């Protein structure tokens, strides 16, 4: 669904070098009704989208499934994050901490570009953990220069700005389709499905992203394979080493022939 | 003349007998010819069928039928994460890695 969306596809193709990989086979359920009718569904699958540096180190991760417009928004943030990290390597830019007064650039002992980048990214994740814990929403990259300046100077003058506290506001999910939306939601299932995706998106952007930022602040810049199992187990609740992907208890709890099955 | 003719016939029959014997012994490198009763099965039916199957079938076909291959969307995916990183070195773009259970180029994923 996501990768047939024209806007998402165009954005990815223009701004990233994309690759996909399978972390394990997906459980498939087939119900054969015995009259030639077979229904096939997947079970308990989940996804993770990582933005990585050119040398293959993870900058950030989107856990789970998103609505297309929210996914697009996050991909744009990923694009800006990557440029921010690159800039840190070149210029040793001091990181402006969100919500705090701008700290004067202190004289530091010279660091390698990679060390500067690692420090900037660690700071980014720590800032996000704090923003999500205190404000309930993540900080966003914004381009901090006027249009004319942006054209001439390096436009990536980024500052993490924390949005105002919205916790007291009515908790309306941002991406839930409204009645007058162009999205055709005629059948009850369509509405339910769209609402479920909106709720998933909200969960991903709050609870799950906070866990991701905590993990990445601790791990630092590492290759994706160092993080995959932990992300799936601790954030997406799908232990890749569990042959039943966490469903064993549900499957066998009251099944009368569980012992016999296990023998085979 | 009659003698020559006789000799020719005998020689021909002997040669034929010799060839038959050689074929029976597997003297040649080729597999023994199927008997006349087997030729329809082996040569006419099975041989072309084996050729067609060998050319088109694969071990994965049984699995493919259960989870058919599909186009993985319209994104220009690199073959691997490593390939994407190599491309990123040249293009200066970041790498986007999409991880999932199952395969993006299968219907059920």
Image: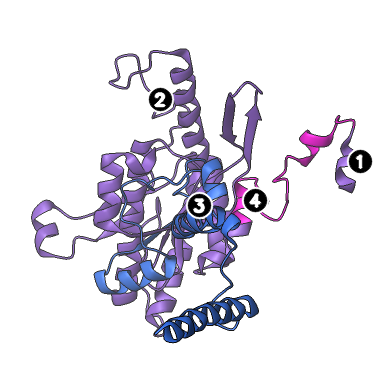
Q: Position of residue A181 (x, y in %)?
A: 30, 19
Q: Residues within 10 Å of mark 4 (few under 14, many from 20)?
A: some
Q: Who is closer to the viewer here, B71 or A10?
A: B71
**x and y percentages locating residue A130 in the rendered image:** 51, 50
Whether residue B103 appears in this view of the structure is yes
Give A105 or B42, whichever is nearer the viewer.
Answer: B42
Q: Which residue is mark 3?
A: B45
Position of A184 relative to A118 (above/below): above
Q: Which mark is residue A103?
A: none
Q: Nearer the viewer, mark 2 or mark 1?
A: 1
Q: Whole-Å distance between the Cαs marked 1 and 4?
A: 29 Å
Identify the residue position indicated by label 4 in the image: A234
First of labels 2, 1 by sequence position: 2
User: What chain is the blue one?
Assistant: B
Q: In the rendered structure, are the residues bearing label 2 and label 4 in contact, judged by CB atoms less than 8 Å apart?
A: no
Where in the figure is residue A180, as x and y percent of width and height? 29, 15
């Amino acid at each position: 669904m996501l990768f047939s969306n024209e806007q998402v596809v165009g954005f990815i193709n223009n701004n990233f070098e994309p690759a996909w990989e399978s972390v394990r086979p997906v459980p498939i359920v087939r119900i054969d009704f015995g009259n030639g009718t077979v229904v096939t569904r997947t079970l308990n699958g989940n996804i993770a989208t990582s933005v990585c540096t050119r040398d293959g180190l993870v900058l950030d991760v989107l856990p789970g499934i998103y609505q297309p417009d929210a996914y697009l928004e996050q991909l744009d943030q990923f694009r800006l994050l990557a440029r921010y990290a690159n800039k840190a390597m070149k210029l040793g830019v001091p990181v402006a901490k969100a919500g705090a007064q701008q700290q004067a650039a202190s004289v530091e002992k010279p660091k390698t570009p990679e060390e500067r980048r690692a420090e900037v990214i660690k700071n980014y994740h720590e800032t996000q953990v704090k923003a999500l814990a205190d404000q309930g929403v993540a900080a966003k990259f914004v381009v901090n220069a006027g249009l004319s300046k942006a054209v001439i100077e390096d436009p990536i003058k980024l500052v993490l700005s924390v949005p105002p506290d919205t916790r007291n506001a009515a908790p309306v999910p941002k991406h839930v389709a409204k009645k007058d939306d162009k999205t055709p939601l005629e059948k009850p299932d369509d509405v339910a499905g769209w609402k479920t995706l909106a709720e998933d998106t909200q969960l991903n952007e709050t609870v799950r992203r906070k866990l991701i930022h905590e993990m990445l602040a601790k791990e630092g810049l590492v290759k994706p394979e160092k993080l995959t199992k932990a992300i799936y187990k601790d954030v997406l609740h799908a232990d890749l080493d569990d042959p039943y992907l966490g469903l064993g208890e549900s499957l066998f709890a009251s099944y009368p022939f569980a012992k016999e099955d296990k023998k085979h | 003349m009659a003698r020559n003719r006789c000799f020719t016939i005998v020689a021909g029959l002997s040669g034929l007998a010799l060839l038959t014997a050689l074929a029976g012994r597997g003297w040649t490198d080729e597999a023994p010819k199927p008997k006349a009763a087997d030729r329809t099965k082996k040569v006419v039916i099975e041989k072309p069928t084996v050729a067609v199957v060998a050319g088109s079938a694969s071990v994965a076909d049984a699995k493919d039928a259960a989870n058919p291959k599909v186009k993985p969307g319209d994104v220009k995916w690199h073959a691997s994460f490593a390939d994407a990183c190599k491309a990123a070195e040249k293009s200066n773009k970041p790498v986007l890695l999409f991880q999932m259970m199952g395969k993006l180029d299968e219907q059920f994923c």
